[in-house]
Amino acid sequence: MKYEADMHIHTTASGHGYSTVKEIVDCAAQKELKLVAITDHGLNMPGAPHLYHFTNMIQFPRVINDVEILRGVEANILDQQGNIDMPKEVLPYLDIVLAGFHDNTGYEGTTIEENTNAMIAAIKNPYVHIISHPGNPKYPVEVEKVVEAARDYNKVIELNNQSYIARPNSFPHCRQFARLARKHNVLVAINSDSHICYNVGNNDKALTMALQAGISKNQILNFSVNRIHEFLYWHKENAQYLKNA
Ligand SMILES: [Zn+2]
Ligand SMILES: [Zn+2]
């Protein structure tokens, strides 16, 4: 299966990433990807970029070497009210917003119930498009409730390739997400979560698991740039609430 995009990539701006935007785009072009999303960490992550990093991404060319670049963030889920660590004034500058749990970023929930409520609240946050690595075993959730919320709000569940490397014991949780995403026909994104350019587009482990769960190509957002454009357009058009926010 040929995929066209990687929608979760960190640069040196994240503080613990090792590649520049140019290096990432060069690697993506070599691998014949058509789109990358630059999604450095939100403000509460130790070593995270300053707010100006996000507003200044307007300097990015839209396309370099036939690779389209989306301006994004991987924000931190903060609480059960749907708050993330990015100010609302800045979010309209961005094309795509991922949100997930990370250590040392201010989230204080400890129980499955609290984690589930917080993840569902993030799904309901109109600015958020994708929940990043929801299978992280450090923050267990009631998977079916989360997947049903993603279905109801047309949001995307990520199957994160890096989870198999950096987040041990993710596999059973990720498999459950894949199985239930299939059951409820929820869109998934299979991303590298690359922190160095050489990993851009690497998604073999997560992809294998998705296919084993019966997920089809049509259900994978990043297999088609057209599908990504349609998805983002739908959210812009349907986010009436953003205008009043
Ligand atoms: Zn992350
Ligand atoms: Zn990440």
Image (cartoon, grey):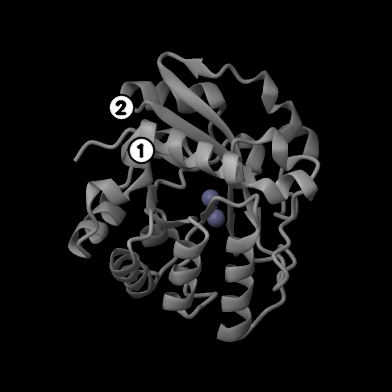
Compared to 85, does 150 lie above or below?
below
Asked where in the image residue 50 lies, by quadrant, the reply is top right
Earlier residue among tags 2 and 1:
2
**On the rendering, which quadrant does ligand 1 occupy?**
bottom right
Judge the density around disc 2: few (<14), some (14-19), many (≥20) Cα neighbours within 10 Å. Answer: some
Q: Residue at x 56, y 44 (%)?
A: 235
Looking at the picture, which amino acid does disc 2 mark?
Lys
Q: Is residue 215 left or right of residue 100?
A: left
* Nearer to me, 219 or 2: 219
Task: Locate the N terminus by quadrant.
Answer: top left
Judge the density around disc 1: few (<14), some (14-19), many (≥20) Cα neighbours within 10 Å. Answer: many
- Residue holding disc 1: 201
Q: For residue 43, which numbered disc appears in the image?
A: none
Compared to 206, does 90 lie above or below?
above
Q: Circle 2 — which element?
A: loop
- Residue holding disc 2: 31
Direction top: furthest residue: 65
Q: Residue at x 33, y 42 (%)?
A: 202
Q: Is residue 168 left or right of residue 138?
A: left
Q: Is residue 145 visible?
A: yes
The image position of residue 162, as x and y in percent, is 41, 54
Looking at the picture, which amino acid does disc 1 mark?
Gly
Q: Circle 1 — which element?
A: loop
Compared to 101, does 40 lie above or below?
above
Separation of residues labelled 2 and 1 (CA atoms): 7 Å
The image position of residue 32, as x and y in percent, is 30, 24
Mark 2 in CB contact with mark 1 (< 8 angstroms)? yes
* Nearer to me, 167 or 109: 109
CB of mark 2 near ligand 2 (< 8 Å): no
